[in-house]
């Protein structure tokens, strides 16, 4: 099964968080699990804030990229279209709000779960939660805005 990010055209596949063509990036992959989107990510030792805990900037960027990918997939789903159909949907972040609920331990795999709160015109609002062993450590909301067709070309 292809991840949402596998459908990004080459000229839009270089993002540090979700671009499959960025050899130095996170290269996250996101899939549907029912009505939720899911990304799994294993932080490396250099993603440390203080010993034993994940850097908050990484967590915010994971929520950001997970959510914009979810926004694209949600728009396709709302129109009952395949993700490789044209015109393509790609989203950028209009706003990102992150709440750190508790320290996120470094070591276990992170699971990011997203759900669509609203689709309205070119805007999709996604709520995403980072979980470690089933415990929510970070919650974020992204207002994702559909890119104009000529963006990034």
Image: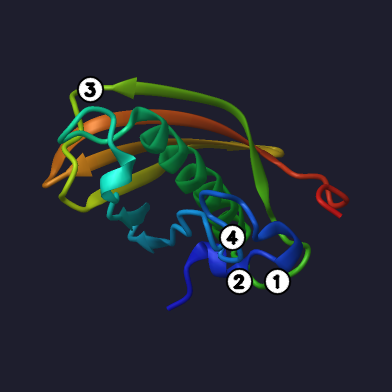
Q: CA distance from mark 2 to mark 3?
A: 36 Å
Label 4 close to label 1 by CB (< 8 Å): no
Task: Label 4, secondary structure: give it.
Answer: loop
Image-based side of 1 in relation to 110, left or right:
right
Query: x, y (%) of residue 131?
Result: 21, 42
* Relative depth, front residue between 10 and 16: 16
Question: Badge 3 local density, few (<14 within 10 Å), some, or many (20+)?
Answer: few
- Which residue is tagged 2? 82
Q: Is residue 115 above or below residue 18?
A: above
Image-based side of 80 in relation to 100, left or right:
right
Q: Quadrant of residue 119?
A: top right
* Relative depth, front residue between 107 and 120: 107
Q: Which residue shows up at 60% across the image and 71% down it?
A: 82
Q: CA distance from mark 4 to mark 3?
A: 30 Å
Q: Quadrant of residue 84?
A: bottom right
Task: Label 3, secondary structure: give it.
Answer: loop
- Which residue is tagged 4? 22
- Which residue is tagged 1? 85
Image-based side of 112 in relation to 101, left or right:
right
Question: Badge 2 local density, few (<14 within 10 Å), some, or many (20+)?
Answer: few
- Which residue is tagged 3? 101
Label 2 close to label 1 by CB (< 8 Å): yes
Q: Which residue shows up at 48% across the image and 43% down it?
A: 67
Question: Mark 2, mark 3: which one is toward the viewer?
Answer: 3
Task: Label 1, secondary structure: give it.
Answer: loop
In primary-sequence order, the first of circles 4 and 3 is: 4
């Amino acid at each position: 099964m292809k991840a949402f990010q596998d459908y990004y055209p080459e000229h839009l596949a270089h993002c540090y968080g979700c671009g499959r063509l960025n050899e130095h990036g996170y290269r996250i992959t996101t899939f549907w699990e029912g009505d939720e989107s899911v990304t799994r990510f294993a932080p490396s030792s250099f993603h440390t804030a203080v010993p034993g805990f994940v850097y908050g900037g990484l967590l915010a960027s994971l929520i950001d990229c997970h959510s914009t990918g979810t926004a694209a997939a949600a728009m396709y789903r709302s129109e009952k279209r395949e993700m490789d159909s044209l015109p393509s949907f790609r989203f950028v972040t209009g706003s990102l709000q992150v709440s750190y609920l508790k320290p996120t331990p470094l070591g276990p795999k992170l699971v990011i779960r997203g759900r669509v709160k609203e689709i309205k015109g070119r805007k999709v609002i996604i709520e995403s939660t980072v979980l470690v062993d089933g415990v929510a450590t970070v919650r974020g909301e992204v207002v994702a805005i559909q890119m104009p067709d000529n963006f990034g070309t």
